[in-house]
Amino acid sequence: MDKLFDSPWILRITALVLAILMFFYVKSLLNEGITSTSNNHVDVLTDVPLEAYYDSDNLIVSGLPDTVDVTIEGPMPIVLNTKLKKDFKLFVDLNTLLIGEHEVKIQTEAFSDKLSVKVNPETVKISIEEKVTAELPIEPEMNYNLINEAYVLESMVAEPSTVFVTGAKSVIASINYVKATVTGNPGIDRSFEQDAEVKVLDNKLNKLDVAIEPAKVKVKVELAEYSREIPIRIQQVGTPKENVTINRLSTPTSFVQVFGPKSIIDGLTELIVEFDVTEIESTGQYEASLSVPNGATKLSTSSIIVQADVTKEESTTLDDEESSNETTNEEQTSETVESNTINNSESNNSNGQ
């Protein structure tokens, strides 16, 4: 038995028989409706599409509903047939109307003349305006709170950078923003690309009824590590040698770029550079290494040049001592010469006598 109903031919034959029975059943009901019109039936057809005839290439019509409701009353077979076939039409013909506001009646077509037809609403208020197309720049945007605090938005570019917006002239004139919004999970820490829907808004951020081409654009988001320029302060550490005086320490580098989380970097007021003077003996330029502050990730440079102004007392003292010794030796030599001269003179005088 199961195999019998599994056969596609059995199913097709069964469907055909049911369709024939339904046809004759509806036909009999229609025949009864023709002979007896006293047995009327009422039904409501909801969400019936409403068509509009006008120059859609050059005009924009606003105020028209997409669908309306229709109440039909008449013999049950005809009501049933109308509901099943849906071969009727509801429309408004605007071809003869000028630009401006109008109240027009919704017309019906292809309903049986044995039916009473009532459209809800019977009339609609519409506005006919000139169709306008404008090329407008896109403003890409994103929620900055989604970005990891160690990063900052460097640039955001939409491709293409403009879209064509078509709509009623008054609507185009009310455009304030053309936005393409990108999103993501909190903690974004790298550059990315994303397709974003284009939205056209007025000054109250209401979405406007316009056609947008293209409706989506690609947005490129570039992130960079958060950083600030922090001033440098040189701090002398260590004790200079006994004969060395450190007069001044300076650096041509006034600031260093410090990278890291915003909450850490914004709390820094200066970067202290410890410079060890223990081995410094003369004026000159020296290299000093920089330490990354706690919580920061890196610095723009790992070292700076420190200019040391130094006085070395040792060389001056030795020169003075040598000069003093030389003077003493000269004096002693002079005294010896003078003494020898006097002694020789006295000896000569004594021999002469």
Image (cartoon, rainbow, N blue to C red):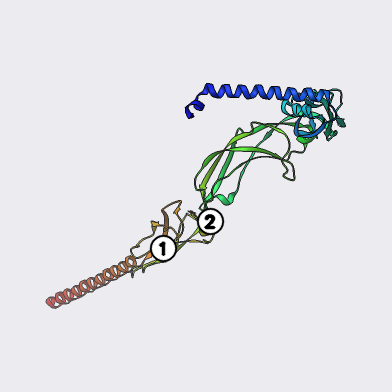
Quadrant for the C terminus, please. Answer: bottom left
Instruction: Give 103 or 275, whichever is nearer the viewer.
Output: 103
Determine whether 314 is above or below 109 in the image: below
SS for callout 2? helix
Dot 2 crowding, Cα within 10 Å, few <14, some 14–19, many 20+? some
Instruction: Give 274 or 142, whichever is nearer the viewer.
Output: 142
| 246 left or right of 337 in image | right
Q: Position of residue 217 (x, y in %)?
A: 60, 34
Q: Residue at image x 70%, y 22%? A: 24
**Picture quadrant of residue 138:** top right
Determine whether 259 is above or below 332 in the image: above
Q: Is residue 153 visible?
A: yes
Instruction: Give 353 or 230, whichever is nearer the viewer.
Output: 230
| 125 left or right of 184 in image | right
Q: On the image, numbered disc 1 is attached to which residue?
A: 274
Q: On the image, numbered disc 2 is attached to which residue?
A: 262
What is the distance, in whole Å, between disc 1 and disc 2 at their CAs? 25 Å
Q: Identify the amino acid type marked 2.
A: Lys
Determine whether 333 is above or below 89 in the image: below
Q: Which mark is residue 162?
A: none
Q: Position of residue 181 (x, y in %)?
A: 62, 42
Dot 1 crowding, Cα within 10 Å, few <14, some 14–19, many 20+? some
> How many numbered markers are drawn?
2
Q: Residue at image x 66%, y 23%? A: 21
